[in-house]
Amino acid sequence: MIKFTETGIMIHGIEKPLYSGSVHYWRMNKEKWSMVLDHICAMGFDIIETYIPWSVHEYEEGKYDFGKIDPNKDLDGFLMLCESKGLSVIVRPGPHINAEMTLFGYPVWILMDEEIQAKNPWGTTVVYPYVTKQFPIPSYASEKLYDKTKAFFMKLKPVLKKHSGEKGCIILIQADNETCNFFRDRPYIMDYSEASIKLYHQFLSIKYKEIGRLNKVYHSTYVNFEGIAAPHGFYGKVKEDLPYYFDWVEYKEYQILNSLKCMISVIDSLELGIPVFHNCAYQDYTPISVQRDEQIERLDVAGMDAYPEPGDTVMLRRRIRYLAGSSRLPFVPEFGSGSWFDREILLTAEEEEFGYLYAIMNGLKAVNFYMLVERDRWTGCPITNDGRIRSSYYEMFCNLLGIMKKNSLHQYQRSPKILILRDYDMGRFRALYSIMDPNLLSSNCFIQGPDIPQELFIPDLDLQLDLDDGPGAYCDDGWVDMVSQILDESHYDYNYSDQYLPVVKWMEYKIIIAATYGFMERDIQEQLYQFSKTKGRILIIGPHVPRWDKEFNRCEILETAIGNGDGNILVVKNADDFEAGRLELGQQFVCENPEIEISVHYSRVTPKVQLLYLANKTSNTETARLSCEKHYRISSIWKGKGYRKDNCFITNIPPYTVQIWKVEMEENKDD
């Protein structure tokens, strides 16, 4: 039996850390496979990951090659070789794989099928403007797409089943890849295909159950759900018009969740009996939700990819702490090792190491390094495509895997007392509040189209909703960012999540800091209120107190509680007035330098043994002076040199460096 655990993976009764790396068998000469895998084993890896690209194996419609024509496509032979070397394998059969392939792994006849293509508001095909070749985007609502995918998977089934089970090497399978409409995640770009509109009406019927209920919310007179046209942009006049547009944004989320359900159904037809995971690209906002992904039956873990640069600590900290606060297992299925061909930057081994350890100190438990082996359109890896070693990257991974395993880093846990709940509905509002989608020709941050200012598409209305921030990214929340910064400066540990986190998980924290605006769903207001009434808990909200529910009926649960003094609720309207010191949370180690980040991880086995992480996030050498009221012994396990002076522990930390110290707490002794 194989299953995810809170800290890694259980394989046939043995729990181990989930540390893996990517290698693409079909992109190498088969004669080099054995040498490359030996190098991977020598670095300390015992798990690898590979895509299984549809377009590679079905080279013409109805014609398949698994090694008889091109030996590099011998999937069965590759898996047999992995088994002979004691390597476990994670498979990612798509159908979407990206991997810098020209058509992202799809066969051309799939993408050119009109019945499968996503459509824009004008009924024409939505094109992904990929740098090497533009191609039509498939619709997640297309039943034909899943039928064709299943036919391909049935060709894979004999090989995958042969290498699953107690004697096989396959331990995990991924459901699709970065299912986010090919990064075209703005709501009015797509999908207006016939299949999508049919699914939209299905979504409305499930949500409202009867048309009369919808008409009451919409202030409309529709006869049936099929008569409701999808919005092409926001043209409301008052706040009561918003539910219609919110529903379209929520439908785009439903479309993705439904797509994952369809893919899991296809995977189940393989009868492999192994856990299923998914990788979100980078979004912790609409239309993506890690928590809702993990509520899908048979989808065990939803991770999130990361390709940070040394200065991206704010982004990386937020992403990892969001996973730590939201997912069953904080997992990065793609953590950049090397760079794609048009990224215009190649990190050094030291820069990559900093990102990896910085993620671990912020709560990362499982990781797949993408890539371990170079290939076309990817460079800067520890192993080249022909089996040579790039010494700086290779030695970095040898040392990194060594320290991670020797010290069982995955068995230590952070213990934050603070949870920041971001307002997922504010991202939805930002998404819907546009008269159309700007930059229709661009795809995401990787491929730039005409830079049309988003402000030009914002309606000139005042909906009187107590919204502080103007146009921006769906994830933007100035109030949350300011509060987070103040907590960081005081070295307080915290996690992120949003209202989709199960309420039972809220109770793991002493303090919840919740972003609240003029509207909030009634049940979320009630849940926050109940948390505030729980003994020993504190609720902090801001910058506003909600006055309406999401259907824009009066809903003043929190406002009434505050007025009556019922519950332990603090309202912080201006984030810069927030005083972290008032939280009265004891800190074991205190550091005066705000440029140094501290994280304490506690042993699951030996309570008095801790790991102390210290990160210098700047380009200058910084000094950390740590004070601690308790008696302790401290020793370096990673890049640390320090000394004690005047009851302080002092260490100098080079630029972009993470130090790890082992701390053994002692009983306090009389002076």
Image (tube, rainbow, N blue to C red):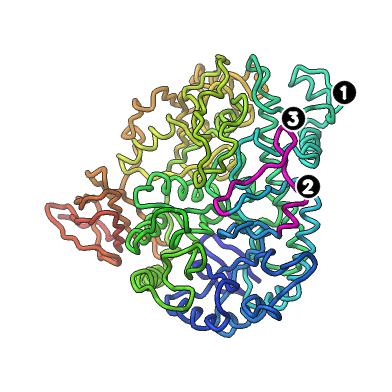
Mark 2 vs 1, N-terminal side: 2
Predominant SS along the magenta part: loop
Position of 29 relative to 344 (above/below)? below
Q: Comparing marks 2 and 3, which lies closer to the viewer?
A: 2
Residue farthest along the left direction in this orientation: 646
**Label 1 near label 2: C-beta < 8 Å?**
no
Q: How many marks?
A: 3
Residue drawn at point x = 31 percent, y = 50 percent: 598
Residue 114: image tag: 2
Residue 451 percent coordinates (x, y): 49, 34
Q: CA distance from mark 2 to mark 3?
A: 20 Å
Tell me where residue 184 sits by quadrant: top right
Which element is circle 3 on?
A: loop
> Given the image, on which type of amino acid does mark 1 rest?
Val
Q: Comparing marks 2 and 1, which lies closer to the viewer?
A: 2
Position of 584 relative to 576 (above/below)? below
**Which stretch did the figure color magenta?**
108-132
Residue 210 percent coordinates (x, y): 84, 28
Mark 3 vs 1, N-terminal side: 1
Residue drawn at point x = 43 percent, y = 62 percent: 338
Tell me where residue 93 sits by quadrant: bottom right
Q: Left of 267 or right of it: where is 401?
A: left
Residue at mark 1: 223
- Quick one: 611 or 109, which is closer to the camera? 109
Q: Quadrant of the N terminus?
A: bottom right
Which element is circle 2 on?
A: loop
Residue 288 percent coordinates (x, y): 60, 43
Residue at mark 3: 230
Residue drawn at point x = 60 percent, y = 56 percent: 301
